[in-house]
Amino acid sequence: MKYPIGIQSFDKIIEDGYVYVDKTGLVYRLVKGGTIYFLSRPRRFGKSLLVSTLKCYFQGRKELFKGLAIDRLETEWAEYPVFHIDFNGTNFTESGKLEDIIEGTVSTWEKVYGRTTEFKDMGKRFAYVLQQAHRQHGRRCVVLIDEYDKPILDVLDTGYSMRIDGRERLLEDWHREILKGFYSVFKSADEDLQFVLLTGVTKFSQVSVFSGFNQPSDISMDEQYETLCGITQEELEHYFAGPIEALAEKYRTTPEGMKMMLKHRYDGYHFSSNLTDVYNPFSLLNAFAKRELRDYWFSSGTPTYLIRLMNHTQEDLNELTGRYYRPEEFVDYKADVEQPLPMIYQSGYLTVKDCDMEFSTFLLDFPNNEVKNGFVSLVASNYLKPEENLNSWIRDVVRALRQGDTESLRGLFTSFLAGIPYTMRNKREKERYFHYTFYLIFRLISVYTVYTEKEQSQGRSDCIVETPDYVYIFEFKRDGSADEALAQIEAKGYARPYEADPRTIYKIGVNFSSETGTVEEWKNVRMLNRTL
């Protein structure tokens, strides 16, 4: 089986015999159902392949679709003039780059359809091209714009600027103005348009990029199109039964066991209130091609613009995840660096996990283990800036937890915290820093079941870690004592739910110094199961 990793051209996939998950039934529904659409999906989720598929369809290339779902639905196969703009592959941090790309693209079209000297404005020049193409072909035009938001994301919150007419302008603001003017063509050229699709990671509706033309139909959370990109469970089992068996054999498990491993690692995206599970296609294809389960999607690109935004916010990662939100709180991007949630959601690092229909709210959390582990590691590295290598430290902690080695745990925590620069502790409010530090640490090691601030009958335990053989109940104090922490575990009965548990229970009281930033006192009590 040939896997189209990095191949985004529909015609190349079909002609060269790569595996193709048939989405053409949904494509047919899309093109027959409306005119101007917007679709937001995370990076490497198949947006470019969708655009290429639409391009081939509107070019009337019927032979490419033989045997696919659309082959039984379409009867006309008309050819339309297609205008494709792809902002992928260009670094827009260089001033003037966006103008060059648009100028070059429009000039190329003008060589085919003619240019008017009446207009200098790029949007009006493009509108004239569309008008001429409509007249010459006798059919309206199709416009496909891939990653429309990349010119903004590249410079978002960077402070990069350029001089325009003797005035210093932020590139972020300048790029918005250029795109707003260019996209305004869709209003003036409405009668010349058959179909328009803009794809991207984010929807910048609140910063006027779309305000220059008729609002597109946003299908990003439309239940009709929730599986337009990505791979469903049914598609996984239909197209990849052989590769699943091969991976199961390598990892010494059954095909059903491998399906569960794939689900936990790569599944979990939801793009409507239907909550249909959607797998990340990039990670799945790489796992099958390389016959190894690794974090392919997250390691393929660092979300630097998200880290820049999160450096500004007063909200921590634990305050953003595992909570219910109204759609307006996360669907649209708002031009406010104090509100990173919409960007985190639209970029694919959070997804809908549940919905409360009565209150029209949605639960947001990490889609799967690949994203959770990668993003938490990135945030922790940026927030804590430890001297130790995070991945190596996590492996050592997991090993100590697995073996019940509390002394090694103490040493690992002490050295790790001592390696965090003093300036990182000093510049943040101490109480907030203290709690967030331990939230991040325990999210990092959550290869096991980890509960932070777990609600119990008499209060909230700071942290409980469950392994196959051990249960660790942590209580933390800042500038107190380890005895106080142990006493709270007893007084609040945090270990009571585990009294009949066959595993060994460790109650661990830890005191940290706000001055040194590390472990000052650590005491643990081993509690054998009372029924033994």
Image (cartoon, grey):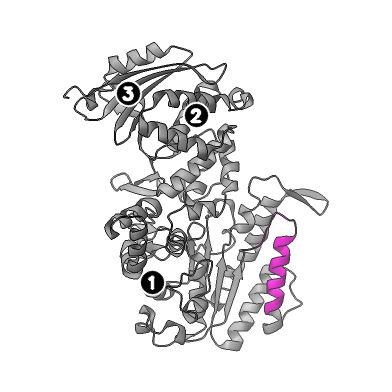
The answer to which of marks 3 and 2 sits earlier in the sequence is 2
Horizontally, residue 525 falls left or right of residue 49, namely left
Residue type, numbered disc 1 = Leu
Q: Which residue is mark 1?
A: 26
* Quadrant position of residue 465: top left
Horizontally, residue 512 falls left or right of residue 531, namely right
Whether residue 486 can be seen here: yes
Q: What percent of the width, then of the height, locates residue 439?
A: 45, 31
Estimate the spatial distance between the alpha carbons at disc 1 and disc 2, rounded to whole Å.
Answer: 45 Å
The secondary structure making up most of the magenta span is helix
Residue at the (54%, 55%) spot, across then down: 300
Residue type, numbered disc 3 = Tyr
The answer to which of marks 1 and 3 sits earlier in the sequence is 1
Residue at the (28%, 14%) spot, across then down: 491
Q: Which residue is mark 2?
A: 437
Q: Which residues are magenta?
A: 89-109
Quadrant of image for the C terminus: top left
Q: What percent of the width, then of the height, locates residue 126?
A: 66, 73
Q: What percent of the width, then of the height, locates residue 427?
A: 61, 25
Horizontally, residue 452 falls left or right of residue 14, namely left
Whether residue 317 can be seen here: no
- Looking at this rendering, what residue extends furthest in the left direction? 531
Q: Toward the viewer: 438 or 96?
A: 438
Q: Which residue is mark 3?
A: 506
Q: Toward the viewer: 401 or 212?
A: 401
